[in-house]
Image (cartoon, helix red, strand yellow):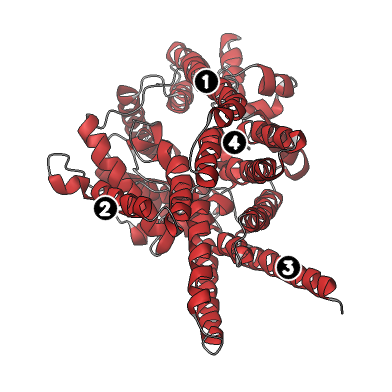
Amino acid sequence: MTAPAAARYVVLLRALLIVAAGLWVFSPTLYGDWLMDDDFYLPQNALLHDPHRLWKTWFVPGSLIEYYPIEATLQAVQWHFWHMHTLGYHVTNVLLHVASALLVWRLLARFGLRYAWLGGLLFAVHPAVVESVAWIAEFKNTLSLPPFLLALCSWVDFENRGRTRDYLLALGFFVVAMLCKISMALFPFVILLYAWWKRDRIGWSDLKHAAPFFAVSFVLGMTTVNAGAAFSHSHQQSGAAPQIGGPAMHLALAGQSLAYYITKCFWPVGLVPISPYQWPVHPESPLAYAPWLVLAAALGYFWLRRATWGRHALLGAGFFLLNLLPFIGLNSVSYMGYTWVMDHFLYLPMIGLVGLAIAALGMIDERYSAATKPWFAGAIAIVFALLALGSETYAENFAGPEALWTYVLQRNPSSWLAQNNLGVVDLELADAQKAPTLKRAEMDKAIAQFQAALVLNPGSVDAHTDLGFAYELTNRPQDALAQYEATLRINPHYGITQFHIAHLLESMGQIPEAISHYQEALLDNPNNNAAREALERLKNGKASGTE
């Protein structure tokens, strides 16, 4: 076998290893059920059933809460093929993730890293990526990363060869990535960071070349922001982010969030998925800002060493920090009403730290003698095996809502969201039971879960509404009404509760009041066909269950 043929054979074996590892790690999720938010994007997404969905997806921003037209279009295509069968959605996410892992290898190889392929393998099996890949609702994450990485590879090619074709490819792939997810918007800053890394400066030509990327980032970013505001307005949702404190609070929280994310990249143990996680932040204490001091010291040390390895460290760390910047809490964002951190935010940024780790492996390997290299290789193999095993075990918790929320409660007993969602699971189990005693037992478990959730978070509209629905199903209409009214005191325009209270009032014969609440439900969600049909029926003088 010739040397080139042998090299191609090695490349193929490494690619197959990355693919096989990725498929094995996520095999427990392939037959997983719907999880939180999945129904919003698919089963309960009214736009999927709209005959004008493609036009609205692309040219009517605000038809969905995000302006991600490529992501929304491909979700519609998936819905056409897979409908309620989750296997297809999970397979798509896993294949996109494996493709990204191969592209991470390709990108790191552009930088001449000896173990670039290990970077692809590390990304494929790292536990911090599990939430993005195993959660159907994060399709936008797995879909947007391949074009982002292709754009970055094309940009590196442009820098090395100066070909217009590579420049246009980079711009085109960046547009595609932005139309999949807005968090790709910091790409222009990444290419300026690359210019500094390559030439020790950022010149006018660099700014000129980056200008179209900044323009795309700004236009599509503002379109997405306006789309979210339009969607919230049309659905009578509050577009205001939660108020969590002043600038000092945000600064302290941002540093501590950074510390959390960096720790989970290097020590991915005890990850808790999609769960309320708000540690106490004390901005009045100097210790609250300690993570910023540590980060400044590390970056300062890298800067002093920039003539050698420090330049590479600044590139990798800069990539990580730039792409994580929108998610560390410097400003109030909607999700911060119940959690400071979410692991799927690491999906793109962690590639910078993956590159640093692989570069460090190469430097360490150079210092080992030939006799010790097998031991070094064995240690690396053990680390990768432990990471893959940890990810596969963690992915098992995404097999369904009961497994997921049970796991979350084990790790975070104060999670009202897990308590409430386990109650929803019990409600569904009760509905499936035929024996009255078993049905009642499951219903009592559900009611207990919702009550426990309200003890942890008395202001949860979901817990109040779900508890009210459970009371309604157990023929306790006054208790149900009390819970629904508690919800409306917190959020008068909550459409789900408006629909439930309308249905309850209709069953109690209070038709004028039911009509009013059905109308409110339609104001919140004009695509609520059940509310529309009920309203038309009542206006025609036919109450539920009567002729």
Residue at the image point whose x is 40% and y is 58% from the top: 264
Give x and y (percent) for residue 438. Answer: 47, 57
Q: Which residue type carries mark 1?
A: Met
- Quarter holding the N terminus is bottom right
Q: Which residue type carries mark 2?
A: Val
Residue located beneath label 4 in the image: 41
Give x and y (percent) for residue 305. Answer: 38, 56
Q: In the rendered structure, find residue 294 and report the number of the disc placed on it.
A: 2
Q: Mark 1 or mark 4: which comes first in sequence?
A: 4
Q: Are marks 3 and 2 in contact (CB under 8 Å)?
A: no
Residue located beneath label 3 in the image: 16
Q: Mark 4 or mark 3: which comes first in sequence?
A: 3
Q: Nearer the viewer, residue 111 or 69?
A: 111
Q: Which residue type carries mark 4?
A: Tyr
Q: Nearer the viewer, mark 3 or mark 2?
A: 2
Residue located beneath label 1 in the image: 222
Q: Nearer the viewer, residue 426 or 420?
A: 420
